[in-house]
Amino acid sequence: MATSQTQYPPAPGGARAALVAAAQHRILLTDGAFGTEIQNWKLSEADYAGDLGLSHDQKGNNDILALTKPEVPETITREYLEAGSDIVSTNTFSANSISQADYGAEHLVREINVASARIARRLADEYAAKDGNRRFVAGAIGPTNKTLSLSPDVNDPGYREIDFDYLKGVYREQCDALIEGGCDFILIETVFDTLNAKAGIMAAQEAAEAVGHDVPIMMSMTLTDLSGRNLSGHTVEAFWHAVRHAKPVTIGLNCSFGADQLRPHVRTLSGIADTLIMIYPNAGLPNELGEYDELPDQTAAKVGDWASNGLVNILGGCCGSTPAHIKAMADIVAGRAPRTPPSLKPQTRLAGLEPMLIPA
């Protein structure tokens, strides 16, 4: 059953104002993993491929299920909403032309994103109609397997497989389709390269400008090691200063680690970001078989500690998390006060790999 929620009147000003208003009353929940949930369906090549007649094998192309077996992402999304998710994301982490080229499906990028967004939108509206509480849809954009900051050739440090404008165009195609399908937000997630994220930001801003209304950006960084840097070398602080100009409605961390390892970096980000904090860790660290063993009540207890210390506004799960993890989180944070974003003094905040702060 869905978690009981107090009803609040709808906020004026679109999705941004509505999310901020809801987050003033309680800690909100986003959803959990899609990939590991899809694995539980044990789908065949025929299930993935459908009748699209593509030249490549499709098994493992989770995004294309929005076209070939839509009941899979629909069922998973419904389970997260039943568990208490206020925000559901689209199953579009790799639904971009770079990633889909591996499956010979790059010409289907728009169709995949529109279809996935419409699934999430329909279900979000269905659950909102049941109790009067708005549910939000975040259009998920993954990082691709290309990097703008680093060379893939150790013998040629200046070489890049793609350039900024090309990647911005890849993201723009995806943003346009996600907005067409009804997304409230564009979620630029699992950011391992800050320059890639900036291409995503520009694409999302241009797509919003094209439709003539605000489509807020959500940003989520992933850490490469316990020092708290992403692959392009930026610290959590530096990353925030590098993307703050985009006025993201949320900033946060996902993937890489479980809640234990993320805790110090959550605390750092919570103290410097004057926007909502959204954190969705893995269900612990993978075991020797690459599987996640952390039980829902274990993950919930760890993120519940963040909530008790006023560090977060929105919680969810990444790899290995399930609807049961989200339900456990919803139960443990019920009634706990949400984080209050800090009021920052005017200051020049710059970012290289490290932050640079210049007093006003």
Image (cartoon, rainbow, N blue to C red):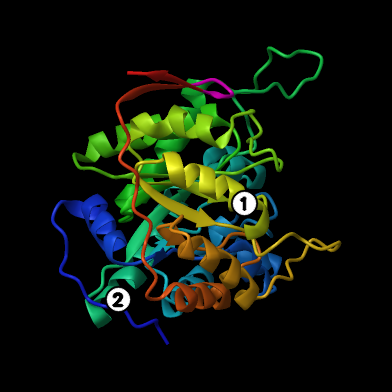
Between residue 125 and residue 42, name the one nearer to us.
125
**Which segment is the magenta one?**
351-355
Image location of residue 293, percent across then percent down: 74, 71
Snapshot quadrant of residue 101: top right
Q: CA distance from mark 1 to mark 2?
A: 34 Å
Residue 52 seen = no
| Amino acid beneath label 2 | Glu
Image location of residue 210, percent across then percent down: 24, 35
Q: State which quarter of the image contains the C terminus.
A: top left
Give left or right: position of 94 versus 22. right
N-term mark: 1 or 2: 2
- Marks 1 and 2: which is nearer the front? 1
| Amino acid beneath label 1 | Leu
Q: How many marks?
A: 2
Can you say whether 70 is above or below 318 in the image? Answer: below
Give left or right: position of 336 versus 132. right
Secondary-structure class at tag 1: helix
Give left or right: position of 318 versus 138. right
Residue 22 belongs to the span the image colors magenta: no
At 64% from the left and 28% from the top, the residue drawn is 233
Image location of residue 111, percent across then percent down: 43, 52
Q: Which residue is mark 1?
A: 262
Q: Which residue is mark 2?
A: 126
Image location of residue 1, percent across then percent down: 42, 87
Snapshot quadrant of residue 10: bottom left
Residue 300 seen = yes
